[in-house]
Image (cartoon, rainbow, N blue to C red):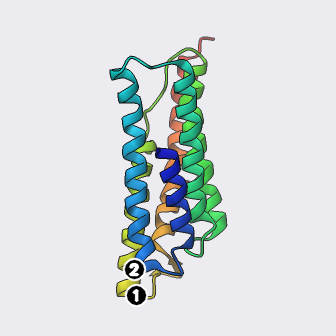
Amino acid sequence: MAFALAILAGITIFLSPEMWEILLPLSTLLVILSGLFDALDGKIARITGKTSKRGDLLDHVLDRYADVIMVGAVAFSAWCNPYLGILAIIGMLMTSYMGTQCQAIGAGRLYSGLLGRADRVVLLSIAPLLQMVFMLFSDGWINIGPITLSAFELIMLWFAIVGNITAVQRALKIWKMVPL
């Protein structure tokens, strides 16, 4: 359910420049619901005693696809410079990769750092609402000196910079865990 909602969120985000009054609030709702269902699936599996390594693998795979679909929808929409969007996707994927790389060396899953998945979901649910504010009070873009950015681009910039910093933080932490 979380993955299906992430796909719908991506579609509404991508199409939102055409009908932003309807699709931006809808995309916020879909991102929130996707995050909620994603948080519940593991809890339900633990409560019902149905956890498994395959379930954990499926959860991680669908989470990465959901992340790329939603952030990719922003990256390639009219709201965002695609180069900035690609840097955001790289930061997001490298952060997740470093978390699972720690698990791969036998040190357990690593969730530390400045920008984890929950943070991304929160920011991705705020971005459409912030974009609505930009649309209501300007032409949808803000000027910061010579640079013009949409609300989505601000969030993608955050993902690009802080996501990659988080990936490096995790890599350094893992490096210290690996025996010589």
The reply to whether dot 1 and dot 2 touch (C-beta < 8 Å) is yes
Mark 1 residue element: loop
**Residue 36 coordinates in the image, percent (x, y):** 36, 45
Q: Is mark 2 on a helix, strand or loop?
A: helix
97 is higher (above) or lower (below) than 75: above
Q: How crowded is mark 2: few (under 14 residues within 10 Å), some or many (20 or more)?
A: some
* 176 displayed left or right of 21: right
Q: Residue beneath label 2, please?
A: 134
Relative horizontal placement of residue 78, taking residue 38 as reference (left or right):
right
- Local packing at callout 1 (Cα closer than 10 Å; few below 14, some 14-19, many 20+) is few
Residue at screen point 52% across, 59% down = 8
Q: Which residue is drawn at 60% across and 70% down?
A: 77
Query: What label does residue 109 carry, if any?
Result: none
Left/right of residue 135 with respect to residue 3 in the rendered view: left
Q: Where is residue 85 in the image (x, y as percent from the top left)?
A: 61, 61
Q: Mark 1 points at which residue?
A: 138
Q: Check disc 2 and give the amino acid type.
A: Phe
Query: Label 1 amino acid?
Result: Ser
Residue beneath the point at 51% across and 67% down: 12
Residue 171 appearing in the image: no
**Visible residue check, residue 117:** yes
Relative horizontal placement of residue 70, taking residue 46 as reference (left or right): right
In which quadrant will I find the C terminus? Answer: top right
**Residue 132 in the image: above or below residue 29:** below
